Image (tube, rainbow, N blue to C red):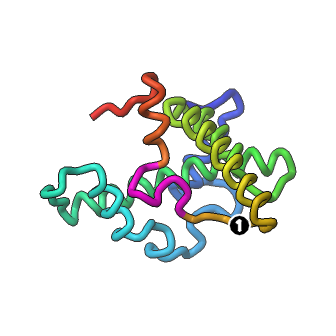
């Protein structure tokens, strides 16, 4: 899934800590700093299951590794773009671009719509409050996932259970 310049292979190497460039590796990052908290991962997994379902520790740990690796992989690709454009800040548009570049088109478009909706709501909040407020649980206050509204409205991105 690399483009003609091999960017995604380079990003994957950094995400896996196997890049051959200068300053490669994890730089001594502790596992607890590299992985998402397992309680959070388990809570998200539980939301998608029937109330009486249980999740093994092994399943949570496996998912924890996968989602942490996925985030690193996508972020590394977005960071490459910022570096080439001589920018220091990775933004939501960069993440959406990276998702598409890496072949995650099923996620890139819903994420773009979510980002647009988020910016609209945040703009409205800032204008009405006269403050620049941020909500850490935008779209998730009632247990919904970020893509629930989009999944219901767009059959091309419907969940495949």
In-front residue for pair 138/64: 138
Q: Dot 1: what SS? A: loop
Nearest the viewer among 128 and 4 is: 128
In x, y percent, where is residue 120? 70, 46
The quadrant of the rendering that contains the N terminus is top right
Look at the image and give the residue range highlighted in magenta: 137-145
Give the quarter of the figure containing the C terminus.
top left
Q: Tell me which corner region of the image, top left, top right, bottom left or bottom right, holds residue 43.
A: bottom left
Q: Quadrant of residue 59?
A: bottom left
Residue 93, position as x, y percentages in the image: 70, 43
Viewed as shown, does residue 46 lie left or right of 143?
left
Question: Hey, which residue is sitting farthest front in the picture?
Answer: 128
Find residue 85 and report its horizontal and vertical position in percent: 85, 45
Q: Main secondary structure of the magenta part?
A: loop
Reply yes or no: does residue 142 show up in magenta: yes
Which residue is label 1 attached to?
133
Q: Is residue 152 visible?
A: yes
Tell me, yes or no, if residue 8 can be seen here: no
Residue drawn at the location 69% of the way across and 27% of the way down = 4
Which is nearer the eye, 130 or 104? Answer: 130
> Does the magenta-highlighted stretch encompass residue 140?
yes
Q: Residue 89 sits in which quadrant?
A: bottom right
Instruction: Name the residue at the left extreme.
Output: 52
Q: Which residue is drawn at the image coordinates 35% and 58% (left, top)?
A: 44
| Crowding at mark 1 (Cα within 10 Å: few <14, some 14-19, many 20+) | few
- Position of 121 with respect to 34 (left or right) is right
Please name the residue shown 67% across and 38% down the image: 97
Q: How far from the left and from the top, in percent, is residue 74?
A: 58, 47
Q: How many marks?
A: 1
Q: Classify residue 91 as left or right of residue 137.
A: right
């Amino acid at each position: 899934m690399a483009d003609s310049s091999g960017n995604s292979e380079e990003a994957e190497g950094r995400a896996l800590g196997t890049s051959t460039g200068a300053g490669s590796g994890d730089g001594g990052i502790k596992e607890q700093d590299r992985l998402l908290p397992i309680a959070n991962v388990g809570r998200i997994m539980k939301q998608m299951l029937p109330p009486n379902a249980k999740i093994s520790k092994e399943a949570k740990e496996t998912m924890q590794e996968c989602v942490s690796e996925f985030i690193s992989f996508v972020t590394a690709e977005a960071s490459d773009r910022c570096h080439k454009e001589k920018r220091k800040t990775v933004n939501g548009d960069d993440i959406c671009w990276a998702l598409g570049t890496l072949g995650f088109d099923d996620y890139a478009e819903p994420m773009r719509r979510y980002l647009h909706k988020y910016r609209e709501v945040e703009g409205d909040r800032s204008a009405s409050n006269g403050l620049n407020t941020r909500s850490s649980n935008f779209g998730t206050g009632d247990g919904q996932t970020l893509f629930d509204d989009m999944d219901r409205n767009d059959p091309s991105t419907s969940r495949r259970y």
